[in-house]
Amino acid sequence: MTFILSPEMIDDIIFSMENQNEILSFDALEGICVDEDAIDDETVIGGRRYYDLPEWSSAQGFHVMGQFAAQVHNPLLREALLNALGQRKGVFRRYKEVLKTAPAVEREWYRFKDQQMKT
C-alpha cells in the first residue's frame, strides 16, 4: 500500500515511538497508531494495513540528549544538562527540568529531537 504521511501522522508516530508502556503499530487504513493488542488478522487487499514503528529505545533518547547538550552555546546551561545526564536515576526528568529554565532552548530541544527521530 502506498500512502503519504501527513504532519499529524508523523507526530503520532513519533509520540508512539516514545511510548514505553505499549507496543504500537501504524494503521495505514485509519492513519493512526494503534495498540498491537487491538489488531486482528484483518488484511487490506493489495497491501498491508499495519506497519511496525521504527524502534526508539531509551538508550537512543539518551544519546540524542547528549548530542543536543554538547551543542548548547550557554556554558552554564550546557553544564547543567550534562550534569543531569550524569545522574544515575531520573535522568530524563532532570534533563527536562533543566530545559524548562530556558524556554527558547527547550523549544530548540524538541525540534532537534523530532528531527533526529524522523531520520
Image: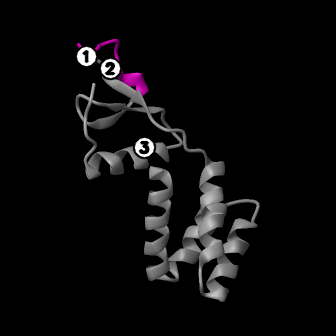
Q: Quadrant of the N terminus?
A: top left
| Mark closest to the chain's N terminus, 3 or 1 | 3
Judging depth in this view, the residue of 90 and 10 nearest the camera is: 10
Q: Mark 2 sits on what residue?
A: 48
Give the CA distance from mark 2 to mark 3: 19 Å
Q: Which residue appears at 66% of the width and 50% of the height?
A: 59
The majority secondary structure of the magenta stretch comes to: loop
Above or below 97: residue 55: above
Tell me the element at label 3: helix
Judging depth in this view, the residue of 61 and 4 nearest the camera is: 4
Query: What amino acid is labelled 1 in the image?
Result: Val
Give the CA distance from mark 3 to mark 1: 23 Å
Q: Position of residue 52 (x, y in %)?
A: 44, 30
Above or below 100: residue 22: above
Q: Residues within 10 Å of mark 1 (few under 14, many from 20)?
A: few
Choose top left, top right, bottom left or bottom right for residue 37: top left
Mark drawn on residue 100: none
Assess whether mark 1 and mark 2 are in contact (beta carbons under 8 angstroms).
yes
Q: Position of residue 86 (x, y in %)?
A: 75, 67
Tell me where the magenta segment starts and ends, as one range.
36-45
Mark drawn on residue 16: 3
Q: Residues within 10 Å of mark 2 (few under 14, many from 20)?
A: some
Choose top left, top right, bottom left or bottom right for residue 2: top left
Give the CA distance from mark 2 to mark 1: 6 Å
Q: Which residue appears at 42% of the width and 26% of the height?
A: 36
Choose top left, top right, bottom left or bottom right for residue 114: bottom left
Query: What amino acid is labelled 3 in the image?
Result: Ser
Q: Which residue appears at 66% of the width and 87% of the height?
A: 75
Left or right: where does residue 10 sit relative to residue 46? Answer: right
Query: What amino acid is labelled 2 in the image?
Result: Arg
Q: Mark 1 sits on what residue?
A: 44
Is residue 43 located in the magenta-colored stretch of the structure?
yes
